[in-house]
Amino acid sequence: MEKPKPVTRAAKGIAVLALLALVLVPFLVIVSTSLASNEEVVANGGWVLWPTDPSLRAYRNILSGGIVTHALGVSVGITVVGTFLSLACTAFLAYALSRPGVFGGKPVLLLVLFTFLFPPGMIPAFLLVKGLGLENMYAAVVAPVLINVFNLIVLRGFFQGIPEELYEAARLDGAGDWATFWRIALPLSKAALAVVGLFYAVSYWNSWFNASIYLESDHWPLSQVLRMYVIGGAQIADTGLSEAGMVSAPQTTQMAVLVIATVPILIVYPFLQKYFTKGVLTGAIKS
């Protein structure tokens, strides 16, 4: 291929810088506003690009053992446990559906795809959770979304792409289905597992709708508390989420909660980025 012309390279560089600015400038404004004083925020019309006297006062206030600290612990627990259970169940089912000759494999696959094309909706899901007695339990925000069909198809395609000779060699060595899955399929599927795990983790971390339906206020995760701070414009006091427990939240506090809810995923993603493109493309093409 011919070397790009200087004009082309310059245009690409300008486009990359513009995209970086569109992403980094809003995030910088959010972080700067969370570090600024209330007076400086008011003087600058609600937003600060670079605080003159940065302070962690807003972070100390919301992480001093109140509702945000509790919600952060709830979100971490739901994300860790939910991601582990979802990844395990998805991997088990995807491997079973990827193997030829599995009893009932095709009907189960068609049933799974049917739920992908025709989701049940909110009311049947709510009635199911209520019928199982999971209301106000953390299982209510994990069990209904335990397996995502898209993630299942990605992992199934990846397992199908593993050379059949490896499976046959394992069987000749006396390995059963579990040993083949554990020693052959999983080690070769780290890229796909990392991508699917990231998808699940982001979904659980950002999920607020199911929590608002199934959980009472003292069990809310950080995403729902963030919604009350930022969208509702309310600050939740230690008395709970009653009318008496809500007061006007300063802009610095709202932005501090937003940073706390955003940073964990930003920290995790760079460690999985090298697997991201490979896992998605390979699983999607081979499915």
Image: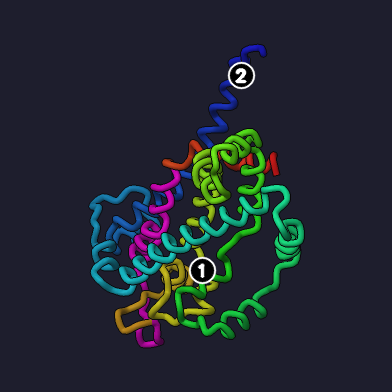
Circle 2 SS class: helix
* Image mark for residue 142: 1
Report the amino acid beneath label 2.
Val
**Magenta span has 252?**
yes
Residue furthest to the top: 2
Magenta segment, prevailing SS (helix, strand or loop): helix
On the rendered image, what quadrant is the N terminus found in? top right
Which one is nearer the viewer's eye here, 237 or 101? 101
On the rendered image, what quadrant is the C terminus found in? top right
Query: Percent from the top left, x then y, of residue 264?
Result: 39, 53
Q: Residue drawn 61% across and 50% down?
A: 95
Query: Percent from the top left, x then y, of residue 176?
Result: 56, 48
Q: Is residue 176 above or below residue 235?
A: above
Report the amino acid beneath label 1.
Val
Query: Percent from the top left, x then y, of residue 127?
Result: 62, 83
Q: In the image, which is nearer the foreground, mark 2 or mark 1?
A: 1
Circle 1 SS class: loop
Q: Is residue 271 above or below residue 237?
A: above
Q: Residue drawn 62% across and 16% down?
A: 4
Which one is nearer the viewer's eye here, 120 or 26? 120
Q: Residue drawn 57% across and 80% down?
A: 129
Badge 2 is on which residue?
7
Q: Is residue 11 above or below residue 262?
A: above
Separation of marks 2 and 1 at Cα, in angstroms: 52 Å
Q: Is residue 31 above or below residue 142?
A: above
**Magenta span has 117?**
no
Left or right, 91 with respect to 245, comes to: right
Q: Residue drawn 51% across and 81% down?
A: 134
Residue span colored magenta: 241-269
Which one is nearer the viewer's eye here, 102 or 198? 102
